[in-house]
Image (cartoon, rainbow, N blue to C red):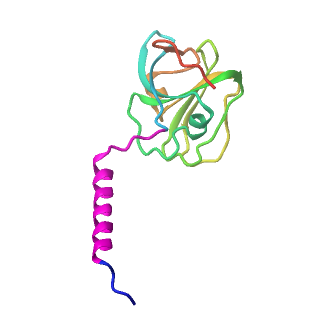
Amino acid sequence: MKPVNLKITRFIAICLGFFCLINMTIPIVRADTAPLITAYITTGSGAKHRFQLELAETPERRAKGLMYRKSLPADGGMLFVWPDIAMRLFWMKDTPLSLDILFFDKAGKLVYLHPEAIPFSQDTISSIRPVKYVVEIRAKTADRLGLNTNSRLLFEGPLPAAR
């Protein structure tokens, strides 16, 4: 066994130290972080509830949804947008949170509400009718706010185009 060259050892130690320093000082920014959009859901009686929703307008973001999330703000959730109107199917695989799943038509009318979806369930949740938008919020929020098929989805500003 040959003795290790001291210069090489120091060089490696300095490089490792520099690497660790850089990794500790550069903030980690997730490339897949969804943009936020302000949306309102109204009730039949006219009450208006504000939400900050993560936008899922691409196939990749729609596929991931709220998987692996362990928490969600009271006024948070996710807005799924498609370029077309069709039947939508969801499941809760890899989703540890219970969610209310709200299905809206192209005019923003709530056509179906699936309350308290079961975490990690692989059962299919269907929109029942063709829809353009789906909103996922914390379980029991829809009941607490009095959301039903008289509810409407409104946006603050235009939505980015869905792909």
| Residue 11 quadrant | bottom left
Nearest the viewer among 140 and 51 is 51
Instruction: Write down the region rendered in magenta.
Output: 6-31
Tell me the residue at 72%/27% (across/down). Answer: 87
Q: Position of residue 152 (x, y in %)?
A: 54, 14
Tell me the residue at 56%/40% (across/down). Answer: 64
Magenta stretch prevailing secondary structure: helix
Nearest the viewer among 123 and 23 is 23
Tell me the residue at 46%/33% (across/down). Answer: 140
| Residue 49 quadrant | top left
Taking the image as shown, residue 119 lies to the left or right of residue 59, namely: left
Residue at the extreme top of the image, as rendered: 46
Q: Is residue 10 magenta?
A: yes
Q: Position of residue 13 (x, y in %)?
A: 29, 67
Q: Position of residue 46 (x, y in %)?
A: 46, 9
Image label count: 0
Taking the image as shown, residue 49 lies to the left or right of residue 153, namely: left
Q: Is residue 92 magenta?
A: no
Quadrant of the drawing holding the C terminus: top right
Quadrant of the drawing holding the N terminus: bottom left
21 versus 5 height, above or below:
above
